Image (cartoon, grey):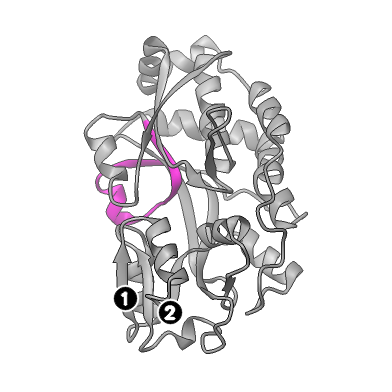
Amino acid sequence: MSIKSIFQSTVAALAIVSAGPLFAQGTPINAAAFDALVAQGPVANAAAIRSSTWASKIKQAGTLRLGGTQTSNLFSLLNEKDGRMRGFDAGLAQLIARYILGDGAKIQFTQVTSSTREQVLINDQVDMVLATYSITPARAEKISFAGPYYTSQAGVLVKANNTAIKSYNDLAGKKVATQAGSTGPAILAQVAPKAVVQEFQTHQEALDALRQGRVDAYVTDYTLLLNALSLGSGDTKLAGAPFGAQDPYGVGLPKGSDGVAFVNAFLKKVEADGTWAKLWTISIGERTGSTAVPTPPALP
């Protein structure tokens, strides 16, 4: 896909190289604006629901069963004070629930990791997974994907005082963390085959290993690294610009589900009416200092 990545734009605008974080640490989301946007989202008509057995099943149950995360600051973070999850992925999930179920849409949440996302769909524990979920051929053999709804690349995170690692070209012989079940191991095998790779089950475990000095760098999706910076205290920094192929994020659905066409129609609708851009601005743009709204990836 010839899609201009948001992160390439952000890098150009903010001149991210090996300097420290360039936006305010811990900038909170505008909860009122987020909630209002979701509450104003579109609602599918009866004919659209009937056209999809996947959507009809959810409508009949009265609840959307969602597989997601609640620790991703920019994409899906739980606010323990009000019990709401907010962020770009959380917003899309809530908008899909509203699209199918209307006002007062209910979501049954299941926490997933990089290693469990396919299995919860295969086991019919959830109706969909929305969790910065990269579309890959291997995953597409087990499940179906709607989208893509977003794109990213890979990035390198190091401790703020690290002067030896300026980009992925400096990872040879270094201890490098990544997430098991993610695209990180394959990326490192390609761009840094001499790195000493250590796989962790969760993003937080990998981040903790870096902060504790047990690894020299952490390589994963650039979006997750922006999350780490937006929540951090200035003890980490990005080493170089995003790199590698465009990494498309999709909505995971049961294999062969006709929900793919239904969700893609929803995505086209919220992109066309400006909801996608508003959600990006509230969840990511205002919190990372980026004012240039990216162009959504092309949908099939």
Q: Position of residue 5 (x, y in %)?
A: 61, 61
- Name which residue lies at 28% across and 55% down: 138
Which of 260/65 is in front?
Answer: 65
The three-letter amino acid code for the residue at tag 1 is Val
Residue lying at 63% horizontally and 22% vertically, measured from the top left: 42
Whole-percent x and y of residue 249? 47, 50
Q: Dot 2: few (<14), some (14–19), or many (≥20) neighbours within 10 Å?
A: many
The dot on residue 216 is 2
Q: Is residue 226 left or right of residue 48?
A: right
Determine whether 215 is above or below 291 in the image. Answer: below
Residue 134: image x %, image y %? 42, 53
Q: Name the residue tied to disc 1.
A: 197
The span from disc 2 to disc 1 (Cα, nearest Å) is 10 Å
Q: Secondary structure at mark 2?
A: loop
Secondary element type, mark 1: strand
Q: Decide whether residue 130 is among the magenta residues.
A: yes
